[in-house]
Image (cartoon, grey):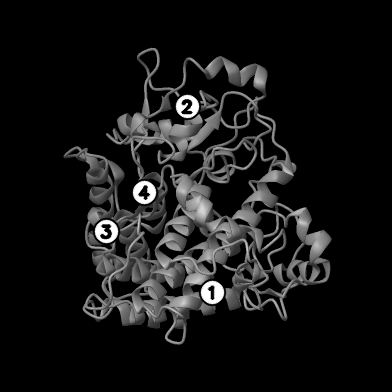
């Protein structure tokens, strides 16, 4: 969604940050006599939601598409039929790192922080529900940043004012970032009240505070599960707290709770994939051979939603092919389905299906009660929720075909349900090493020594503007600043 009227109102917010992960305070815009002295939280909220989710889902600018030209390719949901060096062969341009870093901090976090400032109890426009929503979204964006780069500016990011701006914020270790994110989501749930003041400008849940509470607690379960192998006692306590008290801590209970940006059939409020592939006439992507072969083997009806056949046969493009070979798949391999390229397709950041797979994994790992029996229940709910989300039904023999529910099967199905949400699928693969991908096509040529990227290096702007702290961040990550260093929560 690209609402130009909102962008105009909030333009000054993006200018305050410059290019580092630091920020001068948003309050600095109020010192400009040519700018408005205040911006309503509803406009800030719309802008921040739009910019963060659009950026996450796709971005329609070439070389900047974190989801389309990095994660979805690396996780083998999609493959490129041309320009393999734009992600499919594990290469990435500096623009990918720089512009995603800048946009998430400048366009998203700065505006969300401003909402927190003005709607706090001591702010100029107190409103606990705006505060809670902004805290949920700020946490989600920080989770994307830390799961992409590792250590990031966190405790000092978004701090300071015009009198003492924090222009070179320190980097915090990913473990510390997770600790605070989990705490912030609990605070957000406490702030959000269904009997509290109304909010406007909400293009995710249309002002439903109950659904924001569900997202806060479901996201908290996602993050607790991601760190569970490193901090099992803490993660189990969080899961128990949430699951034992659904009145206080509601979670997703249907697809109606899915967190997504609501797009429209009209530009500029259309879905980013529609802008890139339909309006931009880009046909660079087909379904990956890995995905097609998996869904064909399972007789999975989601294949007909995820893609469409060409030539009357299901065929995917192998990842990493040189252009001379890859181009031969343009008119043969399955195209991306219209469910994802139509103008009003939702831009999804978390679903009920994903939550069920999180809980299935937690059960089979012993992080919540119930063991294999409960894991199977959540597993089947996750599969059926995904099927329902896309308007299809699992064949009667589907679960027989899948076989005994194991951790590997849970994460396999989670990977399937996360189609199009490649950034999240990439995080889960880097955490677990699952699913196990088939051997690379012998014709494929990969950079990065053939290693599927485990993170993005820091952008060049940080080396220029915040070098000392960036070096500390590299040290906190425990490796070099490259595409191979594993993040803190990696299990292998």
Relative vertical location of residue 453 with respect to residue 141 in this rendering, above or below = above
Is label 3 or label 1 in front? 3
| Few, some or many residues within 10 Å of mark 1 (<14, 14–19, 20+) | many
Tell me how far mark 4 sits from mark 2, CA to CA. Answer: 32 Å
Q: Which dot, 3 or 4, sits closer to the camera?
A: 3
Q: Are marks 3 and 1 in contact (CB under 8 Å)?
A: no
**Nearest to viewer (mark 1 / mark 2):** 2
- Front residue of 184/1: it is 1
Number of numbered discs present?
Answer: 4
Left or right: 26, with 338 as reference point? right
Name the residue that disc number 4 marks.
Answer: 413
Q: Closer to the N terminus: mark 1 or mark 2?
A: 1
Q: Is residue 176 above or below residue 329?
A: below
Residue 78 at x, y percent in the picture: 50, 34
Check disc 2 and report its element: helix, strand or loop: helix
Task: Tell me the residue at 72%/74% (across/down).
Answer: 169
Q: What element carries label 1?
A: helix
Structural distance between the alpha carbons of marks 1 and 2? 39 Å
452 to 14, vertically: above or below:
above
Quick check: 272 above or below 408? above
Q: Position of residue 273 (x, y in %)?
A: 46, 36
Residue 161 rendering spot, x and y as whole percentages? 66, 78
Point out which mark residue 279 bears.
Answer: 2
Task: Please tell me which of labels 1 and 4 falls first in the chain.
Answer: 1
First-in-chain label (3 vs 4): 3
Residue 340 at x, y percent in the picture: 38, 36
| Res 317 seen here | yes
Q: Which of marks 3 and 1 is nearer the N terminus?
A: 1
* Tag 1 residue: 178
Q: Which mark is residue 257?
A: 3
């Amino acid at each position: 969604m690209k609402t130009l009227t909102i962008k105009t109102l909030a333009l000054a917010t993006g200018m305050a940050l410059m290019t580092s992960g630091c920020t001068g305070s948003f309050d600095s815009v109020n010192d400009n006599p040519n700018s408005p002295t205040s911006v309503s939280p509803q406009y800030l909220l719309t802008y921040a939601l739009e910019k963060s989710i659009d950026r996450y889902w796709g971005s329609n600018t070439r070389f900047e598409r974190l989801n389309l030209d990095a994660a979805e390719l690396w996780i083998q949901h999609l493959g490129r039929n041309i320009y393999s060096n734009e992600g499919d062969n594990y290469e990435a341009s500096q623009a990918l790192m720089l512009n995603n870093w800048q946009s998430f901090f400048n366009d998203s976090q700065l505006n969300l922080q401003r909402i927190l400032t003005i709607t706090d109890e001591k702010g100029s426009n107190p409103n606990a529900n705006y505060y809670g929503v902004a805290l949920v979204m700020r946490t989600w964006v920080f989770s994307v940043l830390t799961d992409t780069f590792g250590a990031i500016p966190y405790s000092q990011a978004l701090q300071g004012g015009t009198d003492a701006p924090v222009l070179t914020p320190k980097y915090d270790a990913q473990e510390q970032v997770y600790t605070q994110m989990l705490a912030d989501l609990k605070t957000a749930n406490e702030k959000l009240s269904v009997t509290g003041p109304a909010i406007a400008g909400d293009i995710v849940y249309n002002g439903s505070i109950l659904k924001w509470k569900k997202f806060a607690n479901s996201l908290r379960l996602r993050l607790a599960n991601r760190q569970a192998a490193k901090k099992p006692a803490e993660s189990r306590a969080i899961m128990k707290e949430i699951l034992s008290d659904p009145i206080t801590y509601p979670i997703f209970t249907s697809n109606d709770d899915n967190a997504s940006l609501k797009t429209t059939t009209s530009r500029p409020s259309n879905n980013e994939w529609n802008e890139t592939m339909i309006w931009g006439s880009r046909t660079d992507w087909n379904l990956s051979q890995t995905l097609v072969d998996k869904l064909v083997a399972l007789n999975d009806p989601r294949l007909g939603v995820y893609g469409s056949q060409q030539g009357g046969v299901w065929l995917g493009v192998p990842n990493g092919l040189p252009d001379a070979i890859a181009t031969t798949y343009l008119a043969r391999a399955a195209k991306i389905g219209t469910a994802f390229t139509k103008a009003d397709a939702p831009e999804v950041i978390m679903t009920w299906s994903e939550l069920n797979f999180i809980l299935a994994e937690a059960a089979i790992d012993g992080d919540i009660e119930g063991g294999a029996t409960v894991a199977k229940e959540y597993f089947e709910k996750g599969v059926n929720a995904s099927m329902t989300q896309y308007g299809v039904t699992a064949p009667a023999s589907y679960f027989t075909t899948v076989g005994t529910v194991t951790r590997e099967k849970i994460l396999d199905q989670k990977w399937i349900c996360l189609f199009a949400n490649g950034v999240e699928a990439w995080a889960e693969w880097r955490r677990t090493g699952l699913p196990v991908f088939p051997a690379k096509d012998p014709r494929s040529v990969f950079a990065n020594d053939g290693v599927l990227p485990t993170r993005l290096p820091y952008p060049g702007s940080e080396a220029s503007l915040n070098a000392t702290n960036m070096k500390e961040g590299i040290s906190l990550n425990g490796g070099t600043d490259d595409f191979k260093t594993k993040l803190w929560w990696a299990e292998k």
